[in-house]
Amino acid sequence: MFQGSMVALVTPMTASGEIDEAALERLVEFHIENGTDALVPAGTTGESPTLRTPEHAEYLRTVVRLVRGRVPVLAGTGSNSTTQTLELSREAAQAGVDGCLLVVPYYNRPPQEGLYQHFRAIAEAVPLPMVLYNVPSRTACDLLPETVERLARISNIVGIKEATGDLARVQDLRSRCGKEFGLYSGDDATAMEFVLAGGDGTVSVTANVAPRLMHEMMAAARAGDREQAEALDAKLRPLHKALFAQTNPIPVKWALAEMGLIGGEVRLPLVPLAGSHQPAVRAALQEAGCL
């Protein structure tokens, strides 16, 4: 169900800070028209820490309604509270999403047994496919392969988004968890190599602005066509770098505003892209044919 180029969807917002449904509809159609393989709303790139719980649930309902079953929706429902994650995951199930993306609990830094019990509790309580999300640079906690191996034995834990950039983990996780367990890159700069090494796809920030190129690059990598994948990724590399010039999603929301797709607002404590970074982001957009 989850494979290829999956966009870590931004949450478009109005100048007053509310979710911009008109811009969201433009984004959904933009991705479906350009081959994005799945939408991943309300994750890190979707500014999930600033979404209020009722707003988060309503946002997921809106995404599902706009998508109309045309591509899978993998909803970000994780937090650093098991109780809140359960609540959000149940709301997501009621909204009709196809699966939940569960980030490693951040800030409170649980031990590996705590991580196991956290994810197990969610999976056992909510009958949806669950994808783990390991991003130690944000959570200050690394979900280790041996813990993933234990979790993979739970029938509805179906994969992991690995954002460490450690390509050695692809084969380690594959050998531990089996060929049916989904392995997804969470690091655009290494996503091509991740999939060529045996991964199944990526949850991508870059796909927000270059969905067609990311879809084609992932398709080539999944087919084992290194030459074609490298040629396509060469066009994307400036974006992979520029879109992380400041904290994600600051640059990508600015880029989408430049493309006329959203207004570009972010919620505090994030702030708009600094002027010193704007020329590099604009140049990367032009090089990839986005402008």
Image (cartoon, rainbow, N blue to C red):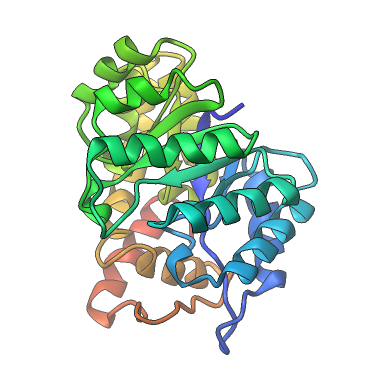
Residue at 55% from the left image edge and 50% from the top image edge = 86
Quadrant of the rendered image containing residue 97: top right
Percent position of residue 6, x then y: 52, 40
Front residue of 120/15: it is 120
Q: Quadrant of residue 263?
A: bottom right
Question: Which image quadrant for residue 187?
Answer: top left
Which residue is painted at 56% across and 26% down in the image?
156
Q: Nearer the viewer, residue 230 or 251?
A: 251
Q: Can you name the residue that lies furthest to the bottom here?
A: 16
Count of residue discs? 0
What residue is at 39 percent from the left and 37 percent from the top?
117
Query: Where's residue 265, x and y in %?
Result: 49, 79
**Depth check: 105 or 163 in front?**
105
Pick whichever, 99 or 116, lies toward us: 116
Direction from residue 93 to residue 192 in the image, left or right: left
Left or right of 29, for residue 281? left
Whether residue 36 can be seen here: no
